[in-house]
Image (cartoon, helix red, strand yellow):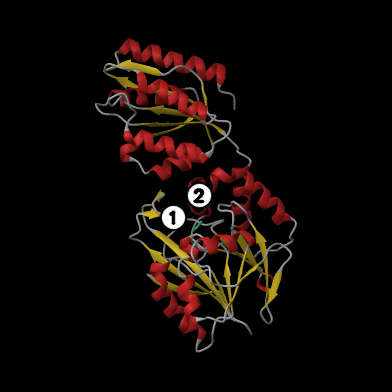
């Protein structure tokens, strides 16, 4: 579905809502209701297009653009980000509007050239640069590694609109345009999942970006991201939530992730859940083979303790747990603690390997693996839960 939303007489959002999409940003991030992608058209003496959307949507998007242009042409194209969901249609757009001037960050120039858009002339821009399109002024600020090196924000001074690209995005695909149409909690919750899966490894860069942003004195009355809905009622809450995530504010919270072949590891997981809950922890528990991993990652954003359980499959951890561990590596979490648990039949080898992996990624493992052979007996459950309790009391400091 494609929708053009008129922000005012001169500014348009063209938004593709793809409810069939199973993953966001390529294969990375499983979603339940699909995704959306937006570009923006600013009509002035010169006409400016901000971002170009993924190639597969070009024909639909182009038709919408042409309706708005009404026989005029595009004079400026701003590439806020080179990732293909925002730049994929670039060559096709340029073939329709070959005289357009192109603006992108310095890293954006390199990224565009390396994505085979070599033959174009780019104008590198950054903080302190602006272009006048008539009555409007567009200013720029690089936001490196939020979440790629080339990311950039564009600010429309006269209308106080921030075109933030990936930043402040969400996977909301409701048929709504602005945050005023949904609750603040819903907006922030969707933003949290998006942040955890896309931005979290770059917390330090988020902090640096927000510090730089504070020097701009840009007043904002609308955030226009390239994913999800536009934000006008909860701008401060959204920015504050990014600042809070970037500070790594952890709670007395545990996330238990596990998978299980014959439910023995599951029995351990459920018993640990009760112990942690009774000890005052907020606890989330996920069986990986029946959970959406991007939801699990959302919960890691503010959790101190991670419990990882697996059965032993031929001296290896289960494939779903291996997938989770690879994602955990990529998240580069700080100041987290963990423990490993599970059931085995005749060899406990994979549990120690898992501990080693966690230590390599600088997650402190607070005790040796809590494991049982085959089915846990009552006395084993009691003993393992006591070990868990002793270790969290002694070692987990919030
Ligand atoms: Fe939505 Fe980093 O692209």
Q: Among all residues in the image, which is located at the extreme front? A: 119
Residue 10 in view of the camera? no
Q: Nearer the viewer, residue 358 or 161?
A: 358
Secondary structure under the numbered disc 2 in the rendered image: helix
Circles 2, 1 touching at the beta carbon (< 8 Å)? yes
Residue in the image at 43% along x and 21% along y: 275
Q: Which mark is residue 25?
A: 1
Residue 133 in view of the camera? yes
Residue in the image at 56% along x and 56% along y: 167
Mark 1 close to ligand 1, CB under 8 Å: yes
Residue in the image at 63% along x and 47% along y: 205
Q: Among all residues in the image, which is located at the extreme left? A: 262
The quadrant of the rendering that contains the N terminus is: bottom left
Residue 345 percent location from the top left of the image: 26, 18
Check the image and report above or below for 97 versus 364: below
Question: What residue did someone put label 2 on?
Answer: 198
Q: CA distance from mark 2 to mark 1?
A: 9 Å
Check the image and report above or below for 286 versus 129: above
Residue in the image at 54% along x and 18% along y: 393
Secondary structure under the numbered disc 1 in the rendered image: loop
**Label 1 packing within 10 angstroms: few (<14), some (14-19), many (20+):** few
Check the image and report above or below for 386 versus 307: above
């Amino acid at each position: 579905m494609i929708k053009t939303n008129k922000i005012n007489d001169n500014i348009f959002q063209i938004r593709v809502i793809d409810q069939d999409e199973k993953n966001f940003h390529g294969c990375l991030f499983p979603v339940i209701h699909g995704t959306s992608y937006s570009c923006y058209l600013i009509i002035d003496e010169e006409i400016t297009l901000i971002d170009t959307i993924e190639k597969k949507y070009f024909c639909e998007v182009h038709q919408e653009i042409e309706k708005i242009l009404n026989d005029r042409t595009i004079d400026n194209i701003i590439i806020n980000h080179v990732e293909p969901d925002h730049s994929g249609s670039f060559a096709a757009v340029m073939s329709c509007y070959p005289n357009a001037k192109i603006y992108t960050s310095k890293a954006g120039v390199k990224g565009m050239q390396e994505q085979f858009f070599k033959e174009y002339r780019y104008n590198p821009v950054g903080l302190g640069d602006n272009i006048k399109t008539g009555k409007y002024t567009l200013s720029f600020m690089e936001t490196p590694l939020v979440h790629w090196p080339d990311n950039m924000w564009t600010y429309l001074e006269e209308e106080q609109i921030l075109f933030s690209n990936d930043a402040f995005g969400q996977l909301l695909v409701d048929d709504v345009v602005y945050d005023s149409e949904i609750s603040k909690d819903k907006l922030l919750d969707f933003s949290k999942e998006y942040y955890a899966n896309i931005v979290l490894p770059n917390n330090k860069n988020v902090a640096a970006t927000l510090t730089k942003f504070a020097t701009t004195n840009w007043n904002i009355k609308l955030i226009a991201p390239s994913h999800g809905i536009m934000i006008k009622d909860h701008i401060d809450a959204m920015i504050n939530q990014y600042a809070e995530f970037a500070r790594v504010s952890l709670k007395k919270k545990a996330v238990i992730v596990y998978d299980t072949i014959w439910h023995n590891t599951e029995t351990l997981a459920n018993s640990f859940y009760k112990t942690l809950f009774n000890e005052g922890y907020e606890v989330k528990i996920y069986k990986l083979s029946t959970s959406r991993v991007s939801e699990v990652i959302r919960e890691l954003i503010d959790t101190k303790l991670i419990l990882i359980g697996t059965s032993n499959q031929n001296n290896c951890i289960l494939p779903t747990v291996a997938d989770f561990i690879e994602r955990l590596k990529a998240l580069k979490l700080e100041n987290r603690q963990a423990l490993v648990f599970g059931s085995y039949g005749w060899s406990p080898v994979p549990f120690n390997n898992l501990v080693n992996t966690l230590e390599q990624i600088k997650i402190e493992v607070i005790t040796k693996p809590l494991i049982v052979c085959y089915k846990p007996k009552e006395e084993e459950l009691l003993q393992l839960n006591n070990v868990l309790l002793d270790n969290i009391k002694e070692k987990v400091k919030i």
